[in-house]
Image (cartoon, rainbow, N blue to C red):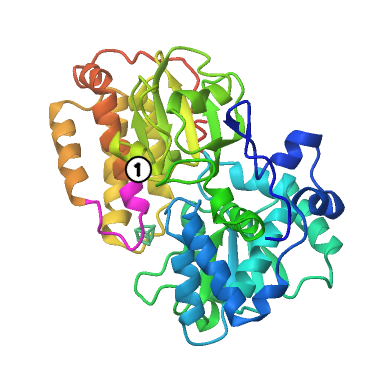
Amino acid sequence: MTTTAPDLRRDGVCAPRLLAGWFATGAPADRAAHAARYGPLPVADLRHRAGRAELTETVARAGLRGRGGGGFPTARKLIAVAAARGRPVVVANGCEGDPAGLKDRVLLEIAPHLVIDGIVLAAAAVRARDAVLCLGEGGLQVARIAGALAERSGTDPIDVRVTEVPHRYVASEESALARFLTRGDARPTMTPPRPAQRGVHGRPTLVDNVETLAHLALIARYGAEWYRGCGTAAAPGTTLVTIRGAVWKPGVYEVEYGMSLESVLDEAGGPAAPAGAVLVGGLGGAWLAPPFADVAFTPEDLRAAGAVGGGVAALAVLPRRACGVAETARVVRYLAAESARQCGPCMFGLPALADDMTDLAVGRGGPATLARLRQRLDVVPGRGACAHPDGAVAIVSSALRVFADDVERHVAGAPCSSAGLRPWLPVPGVGG
Ligand code: SF4
C-alpha cells in the first residue's frame, strides 16, 4: 500500500480512524490536511482489471460490511455491480432517514474528503464514470461537501454530483434512492431487479452508505490486515454510532466493534440517570434491558441479545423513570405516518399497531387490546417490499418484553409513571 498506516491503538484502545482528523485538530480537514493525514488516493492501479480485482479482494478480506443498517458485505455488492450489463453508476447514500441517527451527517461535515475518496475508489472498482452523493436536506454537510468537491475540481477521474433528498424515513432504502434519482419519487420499489442489476435509469447501481465508503477509502490505502487490527473476527474495524437520550455527552462516536455495550455508552459519559433500557438501531430498532456489560457491540451479538431491527448505528438511553410504553407508542405513530403506502401490511398494519400502542399508553387499552396487538405482531413482519414494517414490529415486540411491568400496569389502568415527563426519543412531529 502507498502510505504509512496510522497507529491502530493508543493505550490499548482502538484509535479513531474516520474521525482521526477531528480528534487531532478539532476542525474539518481541507484537502491538504486530509492528504497529509491519510496519504495519496491509490486510484491509479484501478485503471487495470487486475488492480480493480485486487481492491475488491482486499475489501472482501477486510470483511467490510455496509454501515447503513443492512450490513451487507461490501465486496459482494462491488462484484455484482461490476458484473452487471451496462455502465454502472455509484450512489453514495448520506440521507440517514432515521431521526435517531446523526452519524452520516457528522462524518460528511468533518471528513468530507474521506467520503469522496471512497466514492472515487468504488466508482473505479466497478468502472463507473459518474456518481451521485445523496444528502439529507440542508445543514452544514451540504456546504462542506460542496467546498470539498470544489477543492478537488478536475482532479478526480469521475464526476460526483450532489443531490439533496427530501426527508422521508424510507427514502434512504437503496431502491428508494434509485427510484428517486430516476423518477423523483423516493419510495422503495416492490419488485426485483435490485439496483445492482437495474437501478438509476436502468443502469447497474452501486448504492453504498457514506460511512461504508469512508472505510473503503482506508482499506484501499492500508490493507485488510490493518483494517482487521481493530474489532472482532466477525465484525472487524470501527463504526460510527449516534448516542443520545439520557447520557451525559450525547453525540456521534467512533467505537471499536466488540467493546461491551456498557463501554460504548461510557464513550458518551454513560447514563445520566439509572437506565431502564437502550434503544438499539434507531426508531426502527429494538429495546434492550440492562445490564449492558456482557453484551458485545457487534451486529451479531446485539441481535442475539434481542436487538433485531435497524442495525447498530444509533443508541438511545431511556431512564428508568420514563415510560417505555409511551415512548414506543410515539415511535410507532411516526413509523406508521412514514409508510410509503404501497404494501397492505405496512399501510394498514402499522396504523393498527400504533392505535393499539397508543391505547395502551393512554390507559384506554385492556387485556383485549394487548391480545390483539400480539396477534398483529405475528402477521405484519416480512410482508412489506422493504423492511419498514419489520422495524415497527421489532420496537413494539421488544417493548412488550422489556417493559413488561409497565405494560401490565397500563393494561390494569394504573396511571402512567412518566405522566408530565418530557419525551426522550427524537420523534419528529409526535410530541418530541
Ligand atoms: S413496506 Fe411500507 S415503506 Fe416499505 S415499500 Fe411497502 S409500503 Fe413502502
Residue 136 in the image: state x and y as whole percent. 62, 53
Image quadrant of ligand 1 equals bottom left
Residue 164 seen anywhere in this rendered image of the structure: no
Indicate whether residue 387 is drawn in magenta.
Answer: yes
Residue 393 in the image: state x and y as whole percent. 29, 43
Relative to residue 164, is residue 231 drawn left or right? left
Relative to residue 400, is residue 329 drawn left or right? right
Residue at 27% across, 44% down: 352
Closer-to-camera residue (156/232)? 232
Closer-to-camera residue (172/89)? 89
Closer-to-camera residue (140/60)? 60
Q: Which residue is mark 1?
A: 300
Residue 42 seen anywhere in this rendered image of the structure: yes
Indicate whether residue 112 is drawn in magenta.
Answer: no
Residue at 33% across, 24% down: 289
Q: Amino acid at mark 1?
A: Glu
Q: Residue 51 occupies which quadrant of the picture?
A: bottom right
* Secondary structure, magenta segment, majority class: loop
Relative to residue 150, is residue 309 drawn left or right? left
Relative to residue 165, is residue 261 drawn left or right? left
Q: Is residue 380 above or below residue 369?
A: below
Q: Which residues are magenta?
A: 380-391
Residue 11 in the image: state x and y as whole percent. 63, 25
Residue at 31% across, 26% down: 361
Q: How many marks?
A: 1
Residue 234 in the image: state x and y as whole percent. 39, 47
Q: Quadrant of the N terminus?
A: bottom right
